[in-house]
Image: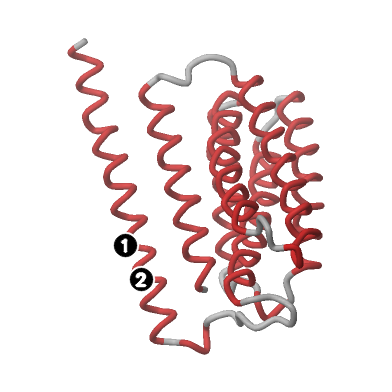
């Protein structure tokens, strides 16, 4: 019990610090967007309200990062089962990215796409260095947040008949993400209540939330 407490205390502090860092990065992004409006993506696209352009921008950034998560996994992983898992999911995320690119004009896309690619790559490669279980845990955490993210948008578009097709498209993407989450959870096996993995869950969740918030404005 004493040893576990020694481990748990710094890990819990890390969880708290991750939230502080996320808030700080979000504040910096807003400040930069305000100070340099020319750096902000356009929220003007024919047929779409500005808030919906912002939503699609976060989707585009997210799907870009997702594709690169699997690039990162495949750059490191040697386990055949994990590589098959990553290749299949990368193909699905690439299809999602193509769909979103068809919905969002280039001027409305995030100015930080190179950052999202690097962040995605590291989110896949670093856990892959630790083995399949760490990758499955990471995908579970990412997709849990993505499910929430898409659900928010789907709910927002409810009863907006002019966007019925868009809503159906987002729901289809969401269903794929939930399937990815469940496959990763099944493959990862037990251990969800261990302290260190729960901290990693929190870091991934906060990182995803921060990236989406920044992509909304830059």
Residue sitting farthest toward the left: 2
Q: Is residue 139 above or below residue 27?
A: above
Apparent side of residue 143 relative to residue 214 in the rendered image (left or right): right
- For residue 101, which quarter of the picture? bottom right
Q: Residues within 10 Å of mark 1 (few under 14, many from 20)?
A: few
Task: State the image coordinates of residue 215 (x, y, percent, origin top left).
Answer: 53, 66
Task: State the image coordinates of residue 72 (x, y, percent, origin top left).
Answer: 64, 45
Apparent side of residue 86 relative to residue 40 in the rendered image (left or right): right
Quarter of the image that includes the N terminus: top left
**Picture residue at 26% right of the left edge, 25% below the top:** 8
Q: Is residue 4 above or below residue 218?
A: above
- The residue that disc 2 covers is 28
Q: What number is the disc on residue 8?
A: none
Task: State the image coordinates of residue 104 (x, y, percent, origin top left).
Answer: 73, 71
Q: Is residue 38 above or below residue 68?
A: below
**Picture residue at 60% right of the left edge, 57% below the top:** 156
Apparent side of residue 87 relative to residue 203 in the rendered image (left or right): right
Do the residues under discs 1 and 2 have CB atoms within 8 angstroms?
A: yes
Q: Between residues 89 and 168, which one lies in front from this camera angle?
A: 168
Element assignment for label 2: helix
**Picture residue at 75% right of the left edge, 57% below the top:** 97
- The residue that disc 1 covers is 24
């Amino acid at each position: 019990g004493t040893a576990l407490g020694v481990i748990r205390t710094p890990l819990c502090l890390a969880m708290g610090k991750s939230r502080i860092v996320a808030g700080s990065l979000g504040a910096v992004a807003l400040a930069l967007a305000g100070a340099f409006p020319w750096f902000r993506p356009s929220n003007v696209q024919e047929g779409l309200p500005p808030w919906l352009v912002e939503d699609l921008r976060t989707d585009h950034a997210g799907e870009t990062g997702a594709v690169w998560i699997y690039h990162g996994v495949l750059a490191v992983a040697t386990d055949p089962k994990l590589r098959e898992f990553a290749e299949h999911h990368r193909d699905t995320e690439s299809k999602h990215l193509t769909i979103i690119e068809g919905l969002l004009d280039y001027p409305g896309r995030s100015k930080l796409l190179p950052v999202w690619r690097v962040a995605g790559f590291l989110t896949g490669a670093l856990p892959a260095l630790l083995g399949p279980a760490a990758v499955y845990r990471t995908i579970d955490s990412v997709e849990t947040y993505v499910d929430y993210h898409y659900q928010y948008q789907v709910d927002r578009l409810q009863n907006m008949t002019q966007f019925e097709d868009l809503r159906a498209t987002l729901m289809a993407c969401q269903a794929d993400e939930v399937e990815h989450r469940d496959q990763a959870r099944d493959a990862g096996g037990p251990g969800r209540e261990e302290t260190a993995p729960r901290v990693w869950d929190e870091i991934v969740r906060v990182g995803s939330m921060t990236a989406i918030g920044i992509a909304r404005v830059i």
